[in-house]
């Protein structure tokens, strides 16, 4: 079947489209999952940062409470107060050391008792917190100092970095957590770094404490989104692949459907595979060639010559019949115009058209071009309209037929006797010829009823003053009968089969 043949180019595009329709939902679903994973991770880092802030605030509350209790003692001699200092260290879980200050001078420490060290308020963020990288007793061990002062009195309490880094490590097991105080920050390994907090590669989230001067950063290391997806989403991935396969399959099936007849016809049209064949029409009386009917053939690269009834219905359905007929008319004009000045009387050229040609006025243009190719007055262009498919008498069709008549184009009703055309219809469209369907001709000498119908058609056309053409004349008997009954024109295998243009021109020159 010619309409199922596929070209290689088409197969290539079809594979590409199938793959794309399968990949597209997978990719789209993948991006949505990626975005979803990023959202989930950033929600998780925010929660972790909040939790860390809560923990640090609790520790600092503990440390600040110690400082508050010691502050009134500042100014008293160290000997009197050092026990009170040590008591705070013992009683409070997070406090590592306590110190008293008088006039910016640290003069008493829970560890050493009497002591002398200058205190610079500028070292403390907002005058309150200082993240130190150790002190003379424990160098390179992080330490967070809390400072409280009132007039000359001051108290410094310290929080061991060990507790801080424990929180950083334990709260966000998979999360990277950092604590920043002023210009320094602490990482989970207990190390103090200088400078601004780094931006964490995935789901970076920074949060400030509303009560103390510190910030917490939470995030994930590089590649965490992929790791998260591969651990959380495997069932969704399977679902995505399933959807991709279904969508690819649907794409494939839809294309198969759409790559059906109309695409193949379009390709054939572009490859100029539709060619005209010519069948002579002869005078009833002298059997001289009076014209030809142009019959379309599909010169298929694989199937050979294809009969029109196998593809014309598809061409009508897809609307391609219009450009296909235009091409047929152009080829006909090219072949016959050069011999047109040898015609002794106007040569009838019959072209088959369908109702879909009559939807607009384009046919007028095609006919004008066709007629313009021939020597003036050398031909009659006859448009054959089958009776099985009647044309609606709308404003546009009436205008079309009016313009066609003005051009001198003639109208024939094809397959007459098989449809339901009325007298009104024949008049409305200014019909010039009736073509008696070959089924009636075939019954000559065989069936009395058909012959009766045939006689009525002949009679009717004589009354209406219409030309009459009998199709499918195969025997001398049929020919004699039709001529005796006044049929003007005969067409059939008896006088000539449909033939290629070159053969037709050759045969024409012998007539
Ligand atoms: P049709 O318009 O009725 O054309 C006459 C058909 O009868 C042609 O068949 C022709 O080959 C065939 N025929 C002619 N003489 C004899 C005979 O003595 N005996 C027998 N048995 N058959 C004979 P074909 O060429 O196969 O075309 C079939 C139909 O396809 C045409 O019927 C026409 O309806 C359609 N067709 C052909 N070419 C075109 C075209 O260019 N456009 C349109 N719209 N339809 C076309
Ligand atoms: Ca015809
Ligand atoms: Ca016919």
Image (spheres, rainbow, N blue to C red):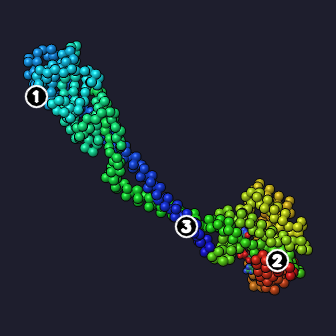
Q: Nearer the viewer, residue 440 or 47?
A: 47
Q: From the Cβ of disc 3, is ligand 1 less than 8 Å away?
A: no
Q: Nearer the viewer, residue 438 or 55?
A: 55
Label 2 – label 1 distance at C-alpha:
123 Å
Q: Nearer the viewer, residue 507 or 205?
A: 205
In the image: residue 270, left or right of residue 384: left
On the rendering, which quadrant does ligand 1 occupy?
bottom right
Q: Which residue is mark 2?
A: 505
Q: Which residue is mark 3?
A: 11
Looking at marks 3 and 2 on the same chain, the residue that comes earlier in the sequence is marked by 3
Which quadrant of the figure has residue 309?
Answer: bottom right
Q: Position of residue 302 (x, y in %)?
A: 63, 76
Which quadrant of the figure has residue 463?
Answer: bottom right
Whether residues under marks 2 and 1 lie with C-beta atoms below 8 angstroms apart, the answer is no
Circle 2 or circle 1, nearest the eye: 1
Q: Which residue is mark 1?
A: 90
Q: Give above or below for 401 relative to 131.
A: below
Which quadrant of the figure has residue 308?
Answer: bottom right
Q: Position of residue 18 (x, y in %)?
A: 50, 62
- Measuring 29% from the left and 41% from the top, which residue is drawn there? 176
Whether residues under marks 3 and 1 lie with C-beta atoms below 8 angstroms apart, the answer is no
In the image: residue 295, left or right of residue 87: right
Residues packed near mark 1 inside 10 Å, few (<14), some (14 to 19) or many (20 plus): few
- Measuring 59% from the left and 69% from the top, which residue is drawn there? 7
Q: Residue furthest right?
A: 344
Looking at marks 2 and 1 on the same chain, the residue that comes earlier in the sequence is marked by 1
Q: Give above or below for 219 relative to 181.
A: below
- Measuring 11% from the left and 18% from the top, which residue is drawn there? 78
Q: From the Cβ of disc 2, is ligand 1 less than 8 Å away?
A: no
């Amino acid at each position: 079947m010619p309409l199922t043949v596929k070209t290689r180019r088409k197969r290539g595009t079809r594979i590409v489209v199938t793959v794309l329709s399968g990949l597209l939902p997978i990719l789209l679903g993948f991006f949505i999952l990626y975005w979803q994973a990023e959202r989930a991770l950033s929600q998780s880092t925010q929660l972790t940062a909040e939790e860390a802030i809560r923990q640090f605030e609790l520790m600092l509350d503990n440390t600040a409470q110690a400082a508050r209790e010691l502050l009134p003692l500042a100014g008293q001699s160290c000997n009197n107060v050092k026990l009170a200092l040590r008591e705070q260290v013992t009683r409070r879980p997070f406090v590592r050391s306590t110190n008293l200050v008088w006039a910016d001078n640290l003069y008493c420490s829970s560890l050493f008792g009497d002591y002398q060290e200058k205190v610079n308020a500028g070292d403390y963020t907002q005058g309150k917190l200082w993240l130190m990288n150790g002190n003379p007793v424990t160098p390179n061990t992080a330490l967070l100092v809390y400072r409280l002062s009132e007039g000359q009195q001051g108290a410094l309490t310290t929080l061991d970095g060990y507790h801080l880094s424990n929180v950083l490590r334990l709260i966000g097991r998979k999360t990277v957590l950092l604590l920043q105080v002023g210009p320094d920050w602490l990482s989970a390994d207990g190390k103090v770094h200088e400078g601004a907090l780094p931006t964490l590669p995935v789901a970076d989230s920074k949060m400030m404490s509303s009560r103390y001067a510190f910030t917490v950063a939470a995030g994930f290391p590089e590649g965490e989104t992929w790791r998260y997806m591969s651990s959380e989403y495997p069932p969704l991935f399977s679902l995505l692949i399933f959807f991709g396969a279904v969508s690819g399959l649907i794409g494939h099936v839809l294309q198969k459907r759409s790559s059906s007849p109309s695409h193949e016809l379009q390709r054939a049209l572009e490859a100029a595979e539709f060619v005209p064949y010519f069948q002579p029409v002869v005078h009833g009386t002298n059997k001289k060639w009076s014209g030809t009917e142009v019959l379309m053939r599909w010169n298929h690269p694989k199937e050979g010559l294809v009969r029109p009834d196998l593809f014309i219905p598809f061409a009508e359905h897809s609307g391609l019949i219009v450009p296909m007929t235009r091409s047929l008319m152009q080829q006909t004009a090219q072949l016959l115009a050069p011999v047109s000045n040898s015609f002794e009387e106007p040569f009838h050229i019959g072209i088959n058209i369908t109702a879909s040609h009559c939807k607009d006025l384009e046919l007028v243009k095609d006919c004008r071009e066709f007629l313009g190719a021939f020597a003036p007055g050398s031909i009659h262009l006859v448009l054959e309209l089958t009776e099985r498919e009647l044309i609606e008498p709308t404003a546009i069709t009436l205008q079309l037929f009016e313009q066609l008549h003005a051009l001198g184009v003639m109208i024939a009703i094809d397959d007459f006797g098989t449809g339901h055309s009325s007298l009104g219809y024949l008049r409305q469209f200014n019909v010039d010829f009736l073509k008696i369907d070959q089924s009636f001709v075939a019954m000559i000498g065989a069936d009395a009823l058909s012959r009766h119908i045939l006689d009525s058609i002949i009679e009717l056309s004589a009354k209406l003053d219409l030309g009459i053409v009998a199709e499918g004349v195969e025997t001398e008997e049929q020919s004699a009968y039709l001529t005796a009954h006044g049929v003007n024109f005969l067409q059939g295998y008896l006088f000539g089969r449909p033939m290629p243009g070159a053969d037709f021109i050759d045969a024409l020159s012998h007539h």
